[in-house]
Amino acid sequence: MDTLYLSADNKATASIAADILKKGGLVALPTETVYGLGANGLDENAVAKIFIAKGRPQDNPLILHVADPAQMEDICHDIPQAAWRLAQAFWPGPLTMVLPAKDIVPKGTTAGLSTVAVRCPDSDLTRSIIRLSGVPIAAPSANLSGTPSTTTAAHVLHDHNGKIDAIVDGGACRVGVESTIVDLTEQPPRLLRPGGITPEQLVEILGELTVDKAVTAQIDKDEVVKAPGMKYRHYAPKAPVVIVSGSREAAAGYINRHYEKGQRVLCFQEELELYRGCDPLSYGSEADPASLSAGLFDALRQLDSSAVTKVYARCPVGGGIAYAVQNRLKKAAAFQIIDAEVEA
Ligand code: AMP
Ligand code: MG
């Protein structure tokens, strides 16, 4: 099939995209986090197409995207006050809430769970497409399963040109990492994935927050987890990634000593000159962690396109959005971390 390219400037884009979704087609949609691969989230057959296009394991549930907080009631029951408070504070925005699912939500969307993940994205265009389609839109990140997420229309076309019905080009994604996910079916609520809404912001509204083990450590293949998707290898370029932690000087010393031809260094803008002989690539400025989240997946994709044998990566420290960047990089590195302060 030909993939229809729909520009954000075209006045007909929203209604064309909504029509395709209503008919059960796949449309890649821009959001502030990453591009999503959208389908009617209440249509089992449409949702099945997402899993096929991405090569996504069947037990990895999808997030349903709504046009406004009120639409939560179409798909969730027993919505706690905390959910309304979070929606009021952070929607539209990069926050996903896990809530009890109504029977109207197909098992294909929830991967058989009794809960469903819901988010209201901060793109006026995407919200009007959802509103016009009349249904919640299931939309996982539009990348092929396991590979770095899609933060530009070019990334989506690279992975899916000719295999999906349409793409809406809304430019590069502002946040650049997937939404924060918080499970509100537990008390205290549980952080399942860090993202653009920080743990600090959640605690301000919720008071308490548990951080799931999957956020900070590798989950064993056979382990039972809250969301099965969390145990899969994620975000990774083909070459192995190793995080080198420690001071700027210690890390540069370690990497320069161990670097071999064919390897790359993924570092901060501020560090480029320390790695002159090591084929460095910057993904943003350490002084501006939001630039790191916005640039991470594009950089990981660039590292994928050449014959790279190994990637030494520099990871920001601290909370806020840097916490989400740490999580994605650690997953890309399968939690392989070398401390340059102690290793020679
Ligand atoms: P993505 O592929 O980036 O859209 O991420 C979707 C992720 O949301 C999944 O991999 C799960 O980790 C999480 N998720 C979706 N639905 C649920 C749910 N009902 N309970 C817990 N986590 C969920
Ligand atoms: Mg994903």
Image (cartoon, helix red, strand yellow):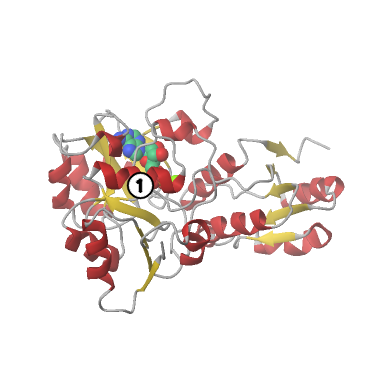
Q: How many marks?
A: 1
Quadrant housing the N terminus: bottom left
Report helix, strand or loop for mark 1: helix
Q: Quadrant of ligand 1?
A: top left
Q: Residue furthest front?
A: 1
- Residue 82 appears in which quarter of the rendering? top left
Does the residue tagged 1 have its C-beta within 8 Å of any atom of ligand 1?
no
User: Label 1 belongs to which residue?
Assistant: 49
Q: Residue at x 65, y 59 (%)?
A: 268
Q: Residue at x 31, y 56 (%)?
A: 93
Q: Position of residue 337 (x, y in %)?
A: 67, 37
- Residue 16 appears in which quarter of the rendering? bottom left
Q: Is residue 214 left or right of residue 276?
A: left
In this view, the residue in front, 341 or 49, is 49
Q: Is residue 49 left or right of residue 184?
A: right
In this view, the residue in front, 238 or 182, is 238
Q: Is residue 67 left or right of residue 230?
A: left
Q: What amino acid is labelled 1 in the image?
A: Lys
Q: Is residue 144 visible?
A: yes
Q: Is residue 199 visible?
A: no
Q: Position of residue 103 (x, y in %)?
A: 15, 34
Q: Residues within 10 Å of mark 1 (few under 14, many from 20)?
A: some
Q: Position of residue 174 (x, y in %)?
A: 43, 64
Above-or-below relation of 337 to 282: above
Quadrant housing the C terminus: top right
Above-or-below relation of 321 to 173: above
Q: Position of residue 212 (x, y in %)?
A: 42, 31
